[in-house]
Image (tube, grey):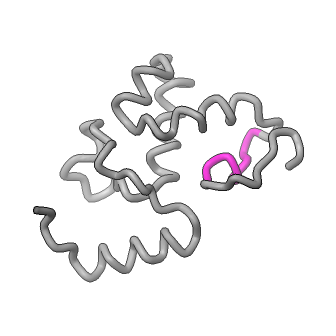
Amino acid sequence: MTPPRSPDRQQKRQTLRRHGTLNLHPEAVSHPLFHNSDFFDSDDLIQVKYEMLRQVHIDRDSISESAQALDSHARRSIRLRRRCSRTACSVCFRTSAAHKVGTN
């Protein structure tokens, strides 16, 4: 059974959902950074994807390693992000079926 969420956490999840940045699979995030942390939040899709991209581009981890530790559902994001023509494309960090590579 999942422990009840605090009102602050519930409010944050509602805000993330409203902005389209709620991670629908926070339980899939197994990276230690996201466990018992006041900063890292597995519910925050942008944080999860950013850390995944950082590990691939800065730490030179493989996409597979990073996807396994952070969120296998975000693997597509790295591939999409690599093809995106902008360096700071916020669309690549959000869940959006409407995003077409090269049209932003």
Query: Which picture quadrant has residue 94?
Result: bottom right
- Single out the residue that lies furthest toward the right: 103
Q: How many marks?
A: 0
Q: Residue 76: x and y, percent?
A: 59, 34
Q: Residue at x 48, y 69 (%)?
A: 16
Residue at 27%, 38% (x, y): give it.
30
Q: Nearer the viewer, residue 46 or 67?
A: 67
Based on the picture, tell me whether residue 63 belongs to the magenta stretch: no
Quick check: 42 above or below 80?
Answer: below
Q: Based on the displayed image, in which of its 4 quarters is residue 79 positioned? A: top right
Q: Is residue 60 or residue 10 the one in the foreground?
A: 10
> What is the x, y in percent for residue 75?
53, 32
- Nearer to us in this view, 8 or 18: 18
92 in magenta: yes
Quadrant in the picture for the N terminus: bottom left
Measured from the top left, where is residue 20 in percent x and y? Answer: 57, 65
Eyeballing the image, is 74 above or below 24?
Answer: above
Which segment did they paint magenta? 87-94
Q: Residue at coordinates 51% horizontally, 43% vertically from top-left? A: 49
- Residue 52 lies, in percent from the top left, at 48, 35
Q: Is residue 60 left or right of residue 13?
A: right
Asked if 94 appears above or below 12 in the picture, the reply is above
